[in-house]
Image (cartoon, helix red, strand yellow):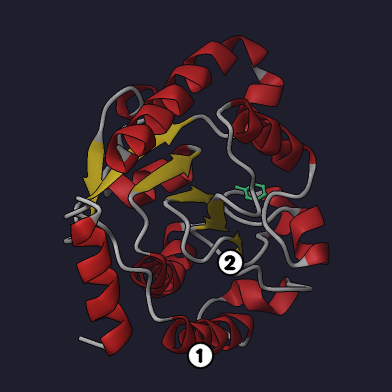
Amino acid sequence: MAELDVRRKRLLNEMGVTVWRLPPSSAGTGQAWARLEREIVGCQACELHQGRTHAVPGTGDRQARLLIVGEAPGKTEDARGEPFVGRSGQLLDAMLLAIGLNREHDVFITNVAKCHPPGDRDPRRGEVQACQSWLEAQVRLIEPECILAVGKVSAETLTGTRDGLGQLRGQWMTWGEAMIPLRVTYHPAYLLRYPGEKAAAWEDLLAVKRALEETAA
Ligand code: URA
């Protein structure tokens, strides 16, 4: 253990804090992130790369406790190279703010597919599979305490089922061998079309907020 970590551990023990999460080493993480983003931006593993303006790796806090995973970049996201910056992104921002989270400082936002599918269609299974290792690498670097999958494609990908969103939401599941707590909710684009479902999405967000508060306590 590095000298700094030993001192930090002793200090925290004196303060009565016995359980904490060490931040990942920022030097290693910075390099790993730079390499990962370069690889995503240059990825040609599926045909979506042919039509993209920008691949969209994701943005936000690289040490976030909450990772939000959408489906695929839309047209606006493809043009800007950032996830969720169109109309549904504005709603997502408002939903996050409502539970006291800021997209730049408190969460990391990405998608199961990093390139824009033509005509705004859903990413196909093969395209999502081609992108899977990027998402797994991001989860390994971020080590989030909780993942929120938004939308059907994201929910089905992360749960590994084909159960519809209506069946998957409203319960805690886990993701991967690390068994990271996973919650699913409606996609903001769906909520824009069906505002009556906002109450259910609000319940999902409150469950996430409670879980984050509990792990911080
Ligand atoms: N919809 C998504 O699922 N992701 C985005 O980044 C934008 C819209």
Spot occupied by residue 79 in the image (x, y as percentages of width and height): 83, 64
Q: Nearer the viewer, residue 39 or 153?
A: 39
Residue on which disc 2 sits: 114
Q: Is residue 60 above or below residue 22?
A: above
Q: Nearer the viewer, residue 45 or 4?
A: 4
Callout 2 amino acid: Lys
Spot occupied by residue 5 in the image (x, y as percentages of width and height): 28, 78
Q: Is residue 148 above or below residue 175?
A: above
Callout 1 amino acid: Gln
Tell me which numbered mark, 2 or 1, is placed earlier along the sequence.
1
In the image, taking residue 60 as reference, residue 173 lies left or right, namely left
In the image, taking residue 180 as reference, residue 64 lies left or right, namely right
> Helix, strand or loop at disc 1?
helix
In the image, taking residue 159 as reference, residue 193 lies left or right, namely right
- Label 2 neighbourhood size at 10 Å, few (<14), some (14-19), many (20+)? many
Q: Quadrant of residue 28?
A: bottom left
Q: Is residue 199 above or below residue 209?
A: above
Residue on which disc 1 sits: 31
Task: Mark yes or no: residue 1 visible.
Answer: yes
Please tell me the numbered disc located at residue 85: none
Spot occupied by residue 41 in the image (x, y as percentages of width and height): 63, 82
